[in-house]
Image (cartoon, rainbow, N blue to C red):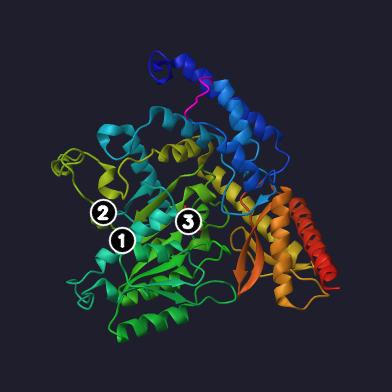
Amino acid sequence: MRSHLLNDTTAEHYRRSVTEGIERVAAKLATTSRPFTGVTVDALSPRIDEIDLDRPLYDTAAVLDELEDVYLRDAVYFHHPRYLAHLNCPVVIPAVLGEAILSAVNSSLDTWDQSAGGTLIERKLVDWTTARIGLGENADGVFTSGGTQSNLQALLLAREEAKPGRPGREAADSFSKLRVFASEASHFSVKKSAKLLGLSQDAVVSIPVGADKRMRTVALAQELERCERDGLVPMAVVATAGTTDFGSIDPLPEIAELCERYGVWMHVDAAYGCGLLASVKYRDRIDGIERADSVTVDYHKSFFQPVSSSAVLVRDATTLRHATYHAEYLNPRRMVQERIPNQVDKSLQTTRRFDALKLWMTLRVMGADGIGQLFDEVCDLAVEGWNLLAADPRFDVVVEPTLSTLVFRWIPAAVTDPAEIDRANLYARKALFASGDAVVAGTKVDGRHYLKFTLLNPETTTADMAAVLDLIAGHAEQYLGESLDRAS
Ligand SMILES: *Cc1c(COP(=O)(O)O)cnc(C)c1O
């Protein structure tokens, strides 16, 4: 069994095994003709159930054969140009190479003595990102598992900074008085974080959005005013730079003004829109982000990185101390004096992957402009999609894209019952998924069911979008036909 340990004597086994795996995946990627096979849970479960984990196959090739059957054949493939559903990107090869290296070396980024250069590489990427944002000389941050964790950590810092005892914050004598302001289109991790942080149930004040799905700052100003009047304490405003549903970007400069006026922590959730930091053409769309106190970025959304790769960045490095705890066995206090960099001092995690290496490889091989160009391409593609949808009487499209998302709904001329239209759209999405021909997402707008393209693949063409719209219309019409049959 020792031959399976990766070390100086097993290099050949390592090389062969990994190469065999890579060959399978390469063959798979080359031959997938659809993003999904349409397999059902009921069809797939027995295949996995029947595998006895206490009876190993003792043979890599045999296990890879089995994996074909239980995973590779029926996986959902984000690299396919007709995968248009969620915020998942096709990944760039330098990052995948980084992934292979980081798991083989297996550095853990909690302490210097488990990572050495890995820590410095991560810190340099944090600095690179804060410089791109424009957070200033005292900025810092840390890589996280994803936007959810980044938002949680940012709000933890905001909560600690809003604590009682601080001038003007006397009213914050308990967490129950703290309020967080986020638009109604913000990510649900804001509410989840509030709960995890022990805030009251009504801590997150939902600010309405306009027709453009951006936070209405007039409403934000009123709520901040009301908050103070009621003797409550504004803890943070979460501005979303790229809403998950619409890609809309809240008016960052105006929000920054209000945060300054009320002395409130400004968090920018740029999990999606962070790709603009590398953009060659559209960087100005997130102007104002440089005024944030903290920023969430998900490289695994718009930097074409494999899951996971994310970071939380802060304007004032000292605020990260709110996540600092010392353990004698790991990161004793004296190491701070000795200037030994232990990233665990800044992180909610302890053992932590060297995800930063993927971004490092990407920037060193492709450059930031390379990534930015890919993201610009999908933003341009979304405009093409908007033009298609706006010109097509079969569809109603919600808002002109700022990033790469389109939300729309099939609307037949002959049907006026919105509930029936809801059902037809839901059916079309399900039927499309079951066919495997394409994958699209869905969401609700003003209580009605809509469909969604999230475009993150520069290989997707306008013709792909047109073809998928035809498929959707076909399924929806079939549903209506059958429902008329049912009625008659
Ligand atoms: C995706 C997303 C998140 C959550 O990020 P994960 O990486 O999925 O945890 C947070 N905010 C926004 C706006 C997002 O789009």
Looking at the rendering, in which quadrant would you find the C terminus? Answer: bottom right
Q: Where is residue 145 shown, x and y percent of the image?
A: 41, 48
Residue at the disc numbered 1: 156
Query: Which of the 4 image quadrants contains residue 341?
Result: top left
- What residue appears at the point 17 percent right and 72 percent down from the top-left corner? 165
Q: Which residue is mark 3?
A: 271
Residue 462 location (% of width, % of height): 74, 53
Disc 2 element: helix
Q: Residues within 10 Å of mark 2 (few under 14, many from 20)?
A: some
Give the vertical position of 135 relative to 437 (above or below). Answer: below
Q: Is residue 162 left or right of residue 190?
A: left
Mark 1 and mark 2 in contact (Cβ < 8 Å)? yes
Disc 3 residue type?
Answer: Ala
| Residue placed under numbered mark 2 in the picture | 323
Q: CA distance from mark 2 to mark 1?
A: 8 Å
**What x and y, as percent, mark residue 267?**
38, 64
Disc 3 residue crowd, few under 14, some 14–19, many 20+, Cα 10 Å:
many
Identity of the amino acid at label 2? Ala
Magenta range? 54-59
Q: Is mark 1 within 8 Å of ligand 1?
A: no
Q: Quick check: is 407 in the magenta stretch?
A: no
Find residue 11 and report its image quarter: top left
Task: Give the main secondary structure, helix, strand or loop, of the magenta stretch.
Answer: loop
